[in-house]
Structure formats: C-alpha cells, structure tokens
Amino acid sequence: MKARTVSARGVRFVVAGVTGGAGTTTVAALLSVALDGRFGMPPSITDHTGGFLATRVNTTNPDTTRWVDDMGAHAEELDWQPGIYPVIVTSVDQEAGDNALFILQSLAISPSAASNEADGPAGARGVIIVNSTSPRRLPDPEVSRLAKTAPGATIIGLPWDAALSTPMAINRNKTAPVTMNAIAQVLGAFSL
C-alpha cells in the first residue's frame, strides 16, 4: 500500500496510523481543510482504507498538485520519497507512541531519505500527531515523553474536539482553535 510518487512540484501528505482507530481519517480531513484554507483550493484526497474520508471533507479537487492520502493503520508501510510528507498518527498510549517514533526514525535513516537529502520538505522527514480520541485523555504528557525521547522530532498533540466526534464533514468554523492550530503546526513543519 505504497503512496504514489509525486513530481518535484507536488505535495502529498500521507497520513498513516500505528493502530486502528488512531484517527487517520480525521487528521487527513483536517489537513484537507487546512490546505484549502491556505491555498484557496482543496487538495485531491485518496482513502486507501475504503473508509469515510470523502464524507469528512466538503470538496476536493482532482486536478491539483496537492494530495492527502489516508492509509489507515499502515504506518509501518511508509517509505520516504521526495514530495511525500509522512504524518504518523498515534493514540495517547505509550506503546503506540513508541511505535510511531520508531517508524519516524526509520524514515529518517531510510536509503530513500539518505540519497535524496536535498529533496525533502525543509529537512523534515515526518511528523507524529498524538491524537486524543477522548476528552479524558490529554495528549500533552505523551507529546512531552516522546519529545524527550527524540529531541528534534516534530511531535504535535491534537486534543479531543467535540466538533470532530461525528462522522460528518468538518466545519472549520465549529472546530476548536487549538485543533486548527495543531494542524497549522503540521503544515509549518513542512514549510507550507
């Protein structure tokens, strides 16, 4: 389940989770909404899981140089390539967080990454999102723990947001500012 290769001018976010239910579809939809807001044109989306990504996004544009792929719980299959921006989604769980960190570190030392060092997005090789799927589980302690384990890694907490708890299209105006700020951090990590 490899993501498609992208031309040097294209941008493809590949969102993959370390476990089922980590929130890849929600994160992919949030990235789509953020890219639409940033560039004034929605990206093309691909749901490799056969899930509900299309229902979470109001519009998509099949003729664009920006894509968002939802790979579901297949983070272990990620392979860094030029133009691919890996976003690894994990739950607020130490074992899942460690798995996400292992995958991120594997991307940073992969032969693809080493041979294409100059082609990367601002030197970033991926982002980990610690996604809270419950109002009782804050991502901050896990984000702090992972940041101490891997200084320099981009690890972003995504707190639970009531506006995301339904399988409907994401409404940017109803989404908590902290949610869109976290997704803006993802874009910033890749200099977008």
Image: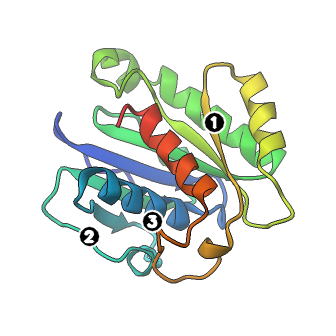
The disc, 3 or 2, on the residue closer to the chain's N-terminal end is: 3
x, y percentage for residue 15?
47, 53
Q: Amino acid at mark 1?
A: Ile
- Tell me the distance, in whole angstroms, between the alpha carbons under discs 3 and 2: 10 Å
Based on the displayed image, in which of its 4 quarters is residue 134 positioned? bottom right
Q: Amino acid at mark 2?
A: Thr
x, y percentage for residue 94?
82, 44
What residue is disc 2 on?
60
In this picture, is 115 found above or below 157? above
Mark 3 surroundings within 10 Å by alpha-carbon count, few (fewer than 14), some (14 through 19), many (20 or more)? many
Mark 2 surroundings within 10 Å by alpha-carbon count, few (fewer than 14), some (14 through 19), many (20 or more)? some
**Kind of element beneath mark 3:** helix
Mark 1 surroundings within 10 Å by alpha-carbon count, few (fewer than 14), some (14 through 19), many (20 or more)? many
- Tell me the distance, in whole angstroms, between the alpha carbons under discs 2 and 1: 27 Å
- Name the residue nearer the viewer: 69 or 63: 63
What residue is disc 3 on?
29
The disc, 2 or 1, on the residue closer to the chain's N-terminal end is: 2
Q: Amino acid at mark 3?
A: Ala
What residue is disc 1 on?
155
Specify the label residue 70 is tagged with.
Answer: none
- Which residue corresponds to the image point at 78% horizontal and 23% vertical from the top-left? 148
The disc, 1 or 3, on the residue closer to the chain's N-terminal end is: 3
- Which residue corresponds to the image point at 12% horizontal and 62% vertical from the top-left? 63
**Kind of element beneath mark 1:** strand
- Tell me the distance, in whole angstroms, between the alpha carbons under discs 1 and 3: 19 Å
Left or right placement of residue 190 versus residue 60 in this view: right
x, y percentage for residue 49?
46, 70
In this picture, is 30 found above or below 164? above
